[in-house]
Amino acid sequence: MPDAGGPGFGNPDTCVSPREARSLSERFARLLHLVFFYPSLLPCVHARPTPLLITNEPLQSRWDGNMALLLEQFGRGLTFIGQPVHATFFPYPIAATIHAARISIAYQANSRAATAGTGTRLNWPTYLAGYLVMTWGGTIITHQLLHLPPPMLYSLNPYIIYLTTHLTLTLLTYLFPVLLSKPFLALLDTVMFPLDAIVRTGAVTGTTAHLVPGSPVPRPLASSTVTHLIIGALASAGGGLSASTLSTWAPTWSFSTPPVLRASTLSAFLWGSMDIWGGALVAAVHGVASGAQAFHGAQALVLPMLGNAKLVGEPLLAPLEAKALAAGTLAVCFGARAYKLHWAAPPPAEKKKGVKAKTQ
């Protein structure tokens, strides 16, 4: 996650209207057609008349309106998570709080699975430290690579946000153990995947925002496409990789091969590493759409395919639209993963052919 102060998600006044977005967003949004069915799950989305009804409008016009509306809803979601939970009682960003809550649920589920049947429990120092590794691993790693101090070294805000959320959810799961049951976790993944994509996009774009000319980051890093992709991947999955490599949800930590590298098939690797390559994908989509210097080469390849009159180096979308496009792209991936993991029928098991013994 970016620093606890929250990335610049914009303000409500910057939300784009369908008419303003229509010029460019429809071309990019061909990547997002699967997300048509999910904008209603986004937070703070007001009821709007749907353009999906059959009318006399040309198909392309209705398509453009749908795409613009889709980007608008993701833009509203990005604006929403940049606001404080409560201006007085908990004046911290919704994005960081959602991240803290989602990681807390995942950490507790992994912890219970690791200690089930062993008769052991995590003591409080291990329980809290392991959780913080899982939440802050990506921030610490990316900031070290960019030669920037991580915010938890100079601010109390991350400790307040994450420890308060984690302890609150620990109490709730103690009182209501069903919150950690497999059916509930499957439902949570299914319902929350658009919001998860929005929060993850905010984390990635908030971190890659340091990779701009004039920032304290060394110039070779700011202008490198590889750096953007690596930072995007680590901002998205660095905490989970750190926790799983160190087994921080177990009573005794140990260093081991990251589980994602133990996948037995290519398909299992791709599904299991989605948090990693999904973060890089967000960095790439946002970089191209926003005209980042590191992605000028990619822009030169994309513009002719889109039939766009923009010049290389110019932003193809407004800042909030570019983030919304990246969030929608990631939401497609997360939605497919939720269906694959929790709802798709497992493939039929192959029958092993037995060897008949010869008889005399």
Image: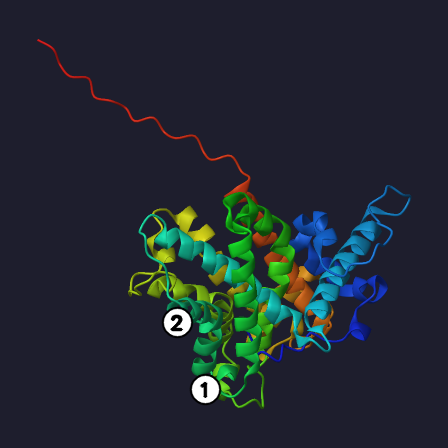
Report the amino acid beneath label 2: Pro
Check disc 1 and report its element: helix, strand or loop: loop
Residue that label 1 marks: 147
- Disc on the earlier residue, 1 or 2: 2
Determine the CA span between mark 1 and mark 2.
29 Å
Q: Is residue 121 above or below residue 96?
A: above
The percent coordinates of residue 88 (x first, y second) are 72, 78
Using the image as rendered, state which of residue 272 and residue 225 is in the foreground: 272
Q: Is residue 345 visible?
A: yes
Residue most extreme to the front = 175
Mark 1 against mark 2, which lies toward the viewer?
Answer: 2
Name the residue: 53% across, 90% down.
216
Residue most extreme to the right = 56
Residue 91 numbered mark, or none: none
Residue that label 2 marks: 125
Name the residue: 85% across, 43% down.
53
Quadrant showing the N terminus? bottom right
The percent coordinates of residue 319 (x first, y second) are 70, 74
Quadrant showing the C terminus? top left
Left or right? Give the position of 196 relative to 115. Answer: right
**Mark 2: few, some, or many residues within 10 Å (few <14, many ≥20)?**
few
The percent coordinates of residue 182 (x first, y second) are 50, 45
Residue 120 picture quarter: bottom left
Left or right? Give the position of 323 relative to 26. Answer: left
Q: Is residue 157 above or below residue 351?
A: below
Left or right? Give the position of 22 relative to 143. Answer: right
Name the residue: 49% across, 78% down.
224
